[in-house]
Image (spheres, grey):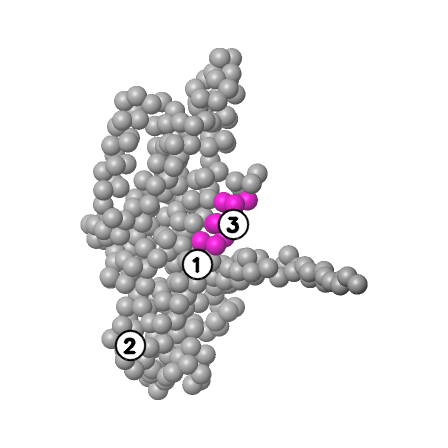
Amino acid sequence: MTAVTATLPRRRVPPWLSSNRIMLCVAGVIVLLTLAAALVPGVLAPGDPAALHPDQVLRGPGQGTLLGTDQYGRSVLALLVHGARTAVVIGLSSVALAATAGTVLGLLAGYLGGIVDSALGRLVDILMCFPGVLLALVITAGLGASRLNLVLGVAVATMPVFARVMRGQVMAVRGRLFVQAARATGLRRTRVLLRHVLPNAIAPVVVLATVSVGTSIVLAASLSFLGLGPSSDVPDWGQLLSSGQPYLANAWWVSTFPGLALTLVVISVSLLGDWLRDRMDRE
C-alpha cells in the first residue's frame, strides 16, 4: 500500500495584515497626528501650554498628567502638541525652499551644460564640502535666531542634494528621442525644459523631498537645542529637549518624550518616502 500524504492548503495572510502594510499604516497615523497637532493643537491639548503651575513641578507621567510636567509645572503633552507646529512648519518650508532652488539649479546645469554646468557644479561642490549641521549652524548663527533664519539655514544645507539629483535626471532625459524631436520642431528652449524635460525628471526629486522632511525637522531641532531656535512662549521640540537636559537624572520624561516624538516622526516620514519611491519606480 502506498501512503498518501495530505497537504493542507496554506492560509493566505490578508494584504492589510502584512507587516509592511501595518508599518505603513502606523507611519501614516503618526504623520496624520503630527499634522493634526500642527493645525489644531487646541483640540488635542486644550488650554494654555505656557501656563505655569508651581505646585506641579516635575511630576512624573500619570501623576495628574499623561506625560508628566516640566520644571515650570507645564504639561509635557501640551508642550509636545503645541510645539509640533514649529517643527512641521520649519520642516515643510525648508524642504520646499531647498527643493525649488535645487530643482532650478539642477535643471539649468543639466540641460545647458558647458560653463553653466561647471559654475553651478562648483557652487554645489563647495556647499557639499561642509556637513549639513555645520553649514546650517553657521548660517543661522550669522543671521540671528529666528524662524525665518532657521528655515533658510536648513534649506541651504539640504539644497545641494536636490541639485545633484535633478542634474543627473536632466542629463539622462535630455538625450531621449522625444526631447530631440521637440527641439527639432523649433520649440523654444524654455518650453522644452518646462514641458518635456521637467515632468520626466521630477519624480526622484519628489521622493527625495518626502524623505528630507524628517531630516529637516531633526536638523531644525538640533539647532534649537543649541539655542538658535525661534523665541516663543511655547518651546519647540529641540528647545524642550535642551530644557530637560539638566533634569535627566530625576525627571527623564521632560527630554525623553520630545526625543521619542522626533524619532517616530522621522521614521514614519522615511517609511512613507520609501513606499512612494517603490510606487513611482514600479510605474
Range shown magenta:
270-279
Q: Is residue 42 above or below residue 182?
A: below
| Quadrant position of the C terminus in the picture | top right
Q: Is residue 189 above or below residue 2?
A: above
Q: Is residue 74 visible?
A: no
The residue under label 3 is 275
Of badges 2 and 3, the one in the foreground is 3
What is the quadrant of residue 232 in the picture? bottom left
Outermost residue to the front = 1
The residue under label 1 is 267
Disc 2/disc 3 C-alpha distance (Å): 36 Å
Q: Secondary structure at mark 1?
A: helix
Q: Secondary structure at mark 3?
A: helix
Disc 3/disc 1 C-alpha distance (Å): 12 Å
Q: Position of residue 91 (x, y in %)?
A: 39, 53
Q: Is residue 172 above or below residue 73?
A: above
Q: Is residue 277 located in the magenta-colored stretch of the structure?
A: yes
**What residue appears at the point 34 percent right and 41 percent down from the top-left corner?**
161
- Most common secondary structure along the magenta stretch: helix
Of residues 33 and 264, which is closer to you in this image? 264
Q: Secondary structure at mark 2?
A: loop
Sequence-first disc among 1 and 2: 2
Q: Position of residue 73 (x, y in %)?
A: 35, 80
Residue 110 left/right relative to 182: left
Q: Which mark is drawn over residue 101? A: none
What is the quadrant of residue 231 in the picture? bottom left
Sequence-first disc among 2 and 3: 2
Of residues 17 and 202, which is closer to you in this image? 17
The residue under label 2 is 248
**What residue appears at the point 37 percent right and 43 percent down from the top-left corner?**
97
